[in-house]
Image (cartoon, rainbow, N blue to C red):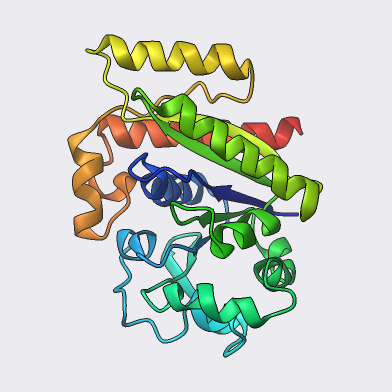
Amino acid sequence: MGRIIAIANQKGGVGKTTTAINLSACLAEAGQKVLTVDMDPQGNATSGLGLEKGYVENTVYQMLIGECELEECIQSSVQENLDVIASDVNLAGAEIELLEFDDKETILRGCLRHIKEQYDFIIIDCPPSLSILTINAMTAADTVIVPIQCEYYALEGLSQVLRNINLIKKKLNPSLELEGVVFTMYDARTNLSLEVVENVKAYLKENIYKTIIPRNVRLAEAPSYGMPINLYASRSAGAESYRLLAAEVIGRGKEA
C-alpha cells in the first residue's frame, strides 16, 4: 500500500515546492514508484519536473471538477519511476468552483484511492495557504511533511501548520499524522540557522528529520532548467541532502 504525503506550509518561500520536486525525484532514483501531484496553481512543481505549464491537456484542475478521470491526467515516466499530475493557473478557479460541490474537501481523496496501491509514494505539493486545495491534499494524505526555513519566524509558521493538521485530523481525516519537519535553506555560517534548529527541536521533541537541506546555488538554479537536483547537479550538496532525506522517508515507512 502506497503512502500519500502532503508537503505543506502556509508560509511561502520555505522550500516547499523544492522539497516536493526533489524528494519525489530522489525517491524515484532510489527505486520507489512515485506519483507527484501538483496542487499549487503556480504550477512550479510541474515546471520543475520538466513539464510545460499551460501545455498539459488534462491537469489536476480537470480532475477535481470532474472533466476527466485521474488516469487521463497522469504524465507517465517524467523520470524513471516518476509520474506527475500537472497543475496550471486554471487551478486557482477551482477554489470557487469547488464551493458548489457537496464533497469539496474529499474530492482528491476519492480520486487517489483508486491508484494508491500502484505507487510506493504519492507526494502532493500544496499551495502556500490553507485553501480548499490544501484541505483536499491533507484530507487525502496519510502524513504531512513540513519544510521550515531556518529563519526568525519559523516557529510561528510551524505552530500554524500543526494547528491546521490537528483541525483536519479532528474534522476530516482522523488518521492524518505529522510525518516530520525538514529544515531548509540552512546556512552553517549563521548563528540564526543553528538557533532555529535548536528551538524547533526543543518545541517538537520528535518528528524532525536528521537531514538538513543547505542553502545551495545549484538547488536554486535547477527549476529554471526543468530538472530536479539529482539530474541537474548530481554531485551537489543539495542533491546529496535530498537523497539522504529520501532514504529517511523510506526508512520511516519500514519502521511504521
Q: Position of residue 228 (x, y in %)?
A: 32, 51
In percent of the image, x 58 and y 50: which residue is there? Answer: 6
Viewer-side residue, 67 vs 25:
67
Residues 204 and 33: in front is 204
Q: Quadrant of residue 176?
A: top right
42 lies left or right of 178: left
Q: Residue at x 43, y 36 (%)?
A: 243
Which one is nearer the viewer's eye here, 129 or 252? 129
Q: Relative to 232, is 147 on the left or the right? A: right
Q: Is residue 231 above or below residue 132?
A: above
Please give the name of the residue rendered at 33% of the width and 17% of the height, measured from the top-left corner: 193
The image quadrant where one finds the C terminus is: top right
Q: Position of residue 161 (x, y in %)?
A: 56, 39
Which residue is painted at 18% across and 36% down in the image?
A: 217
Toward the bottom, the furthest residue is 67
Total marks shown come to: 0
